[in-house]
Image (tube, rainbow, N blue to C red):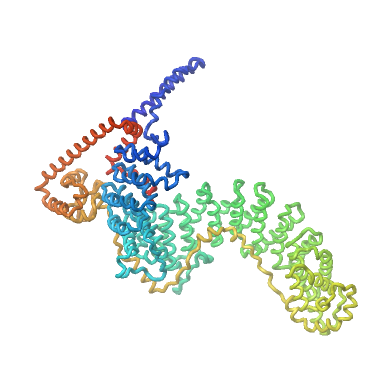
Amino acid sequence: MSDLSKNFSSLLESAKGLSQVLRQSAGNSGNFDSSALKEILNANSLSAFNTSFVDAGIDQKPLSTEEIIHKLNSTREGSKLIALKYIMKLMSTESVRDDEMLVYFPHVLKGINSPNLTIKKLVFIFLLRYNHKQPDIALLSINAIQKSLADRDPVIRSLAIRVLGGVQIKAIVPILILSLKKTVVDVSALVRASSAIAIRKCHVLNGSSLYQAEDDEYVIQEADNDSITAQLYTFLSKLLADSDPMVIGTALIAFHELFPHGYKLLHKVFRHICSNLTALEPVAQSLAIQLLTIYSRKFLQKAHVVLDDNEKIYFDCYPHKCSNVESSTDVHYDPDLILFLDAQKNLIHSLDSNVLFSVAKSFLCLSCATTIKTYKIDAMLLNMVSLVEPSGLKPYVLQLILVFTMYEPSLFFSHIKEFFVLPSDDSRTIHLKVAILVQLLNADTFGPIFNELKYYLHDSSYVEDESKVEILKLVNELYSSPHLFESQISNILSWYLSKLDRCIQPSLLPEYFNGIRLFIQENLISNERTLGILVAKLIEHKVEGPTKGSIIWLLGEFANLSNPHADTSFIVDILRVMLQNFPSEGPEVKLNILYLAAKLLAKDIYNLKTSNNNNSDFSFNSPLFKCFNLVLNYCKYDKSVDIRDRARFISSLLPNLVIDEENSVKIVNLERLIETQHISLTRKLRRIEIGVLVFQVFKKPPKISTKKCERLISKLIVDYLKMVEWNALSANELARFTEKRSLDLDIKNYSQNTSWLSNEYNKSNTNEPALESHNPFTVGSGQPQFSRQNKLQSSKSLKIKTLDEFFSSDSVEDYSSSSSNENSGKDDDDADYDRDDGDDDEEEEEEQEEEDEEDEEDEEDEEDDDEGNVMIEGSRKDEKSRSTNYSEIGDTRGKWV
């Protein structure tokens, strides 16, 4: 700290001198004194930048293999640290192969017992990376890792169990299991959380199969109690019942990997997880919400309303359409489901997008619309749009909102303006916002939404033509909307017709015609004027392709629905005009012309048959019959197999001359052929019932649902929202599951035992109250409260021993006898304590003398010591305060998961 303060003071002095030079130069009318500035910014002043913030010795010069090995085998901690950091640099270089790094493997492992925490971390990283390359050498480090499990520092203990679980050698599985038995009950929450991570790795290392049972509960058989899976399940059961949220979160992640379908294993811990849900980390929160959502649909009762006659009406949840519920209706939920929903109430303010997505999915799959609005999930989704915009998740949030509007549009009726298109929106965002507006459009919101859509189509300059086509397709879906009045439908239709005479984009014209066709097909008779406008555009050749075919189809439907005695000769004239370009038309237009001719002929024959039983009065020389035979003749030799097949089918139902004439293509005198075939044609008229039935019976217009809104939802969101069906449970099953959730859970609370000593050590000293290293007071039932001074006094009564002496059987007995005779042996213990301290000081002095001698003998080590002086000094300070400073816990967790 003193060197660092000197560096800062040097910087401050340099800054003051620089400001004085600049002020003097400004006062001398621009005469700048460059020599004074150089004097201030000399090499000695810039030495302040050579602090611990710079990695000394790493980027200065490359090291050879011999130099790295020499530094790794050096007795100087600074040399080891420089060599290890250089090795980390090589590990991150793509040009260096793994085989080249194995040269350093045995030399790196020598530093595993280093007292420097930084060196120990780097050795662990190297060991995890290359242990499977040289398993025999890696096994030599297992003993040292096991000794680290008994270290006084919880950070080192957590690192040790993680590294032990990360060693990819199957032979250490029994050792790992024995280590887990101790670490899952460790007094440090960090160590217990690391144990959950080691459990996951142990399961993978052992190669055990995943638990796939869905219907039967997981029962550990007596003969299988010693199996690896059974022991891991026992460890996870303890960790899930822990009182620390960090431990619960890591245990949930491990539980989901080991038992992905074991939802029945969550009976006992369901309420415990709900009570700690807000304290979990975001990753664990997201996973816990998804697990408990599936659990709720499997083992909890569905939301329902109780009527006056005690009849229950259960609500349909996603993916089914939401049941209509009045806001004043009391919705009854299972008490455990209410507990789960209440636990998520505060998570709507989370800044993590995964958590927000999980909360939205949970409420969508478990509750009705009134509950979603009560818990302000709609407001949460709107806030997510701006929250996730920098991360590129905005389209997925809009897709989720679109799903909510399709599920229950009333959730966002009061937030219509939030979905108006902005100039900064891209095309995908525009499509989704318009789809949401279309879903929200009803009789009350028709005015503002429809005006906004008209603005996007013709007045806005920031909406591209492709987006306008998509907007029109979405608006066309309103033809079958049950939420609009007839006047509003007429308003849309009138606006469509007004755009046909104006100069609009050619890409929009087919969609306008298609929309008109969809809006008038339900009631063609009352929209005869509109149909006339479309026919005029048809004759003027202003429409092509599928749009032209749809208008021709409307003509055929209009002919069938009109008055039987009405004059339809104008439709025959339209048919005659369209036959002029029949060979050059597309397949869809050809088929609709064929259908139009068949419908007109069938209606003519049907009207004649109903008015006069004498079928001989039918005129085969009529223009309609001639046009029908000409169409069949064209279709008989068309390139499309589908058109030829349909023409053959129609010719078998209606009288014609084409199907019976082998050389019909050479026919030049149709009237003469009619005279020769008159008898056979008359015979066909008597069997016309099937043909009339096919073409004359009223058929409801097809509901052409494009489902454009559903296609805007990506497969990623669809798969994410997939959910199991809600189980229909009997009353006995519900009571049985509720009883299991109500069982008393043995929650593991280690807050009253935070000493570095193990549980077995504390159990052997039941006469002594447990010491607490984190809190100044120990509160518990039947236990006295100790202040910091009392703790220090009681700690002096303990005889400080090494770990090997402590875990030996003799020392435990000695400690028990010494603790029972505390008053008589207090002075002796204090003397031993002082002697131990004196011995430690002497050893440190001897080590210092040896280091000084090595500095004089070896100049290279002296240079290395100068390069890493600041780092070593900082590491020594960390070592002295390691028992109370846990600032590195967060970094360690991030590196070693």
Would you say 397 lies left or right of 770 here?
right
Residue found at the very far front of the displayed protein: 66
Q: Is residue 440 left or right of residue 47?
A: right
* 655 on left or right of 237: right
Image quarter in which the N terminus is found: top left
Which residue is rendered at x = 50% and y = 59% of the image? Answer: 720
State the image coordinates of residue 634 (x, y, percent, origin top left).
Answer: 81, 70
Q: Quadrant of residue 700?
A: bottom right
Report whether 99 appears left or right of 826.
Answer: right
Q: Would residue 718 be visible to someone looking at this image?
A: yes
Q: With respect to residue 596, does 256 lie above or below?
A: above
Of 544 and 505, nearer the camera is 544
User: How many circles with numbers are drawn on the protein?
Assistant: 0
The percent position of residue 385, horizontal first and vertical second, equals 53, 51
Task: Say which residue appears at 50% left-offset and 67% top-offset.
Answer: 316
Q: Nearer the viewer, residue 139 or 40?
A: 139
- Say if residue 248 shows up in the picture: no
Q: Is residue 424 above or below residue 669?
A: above
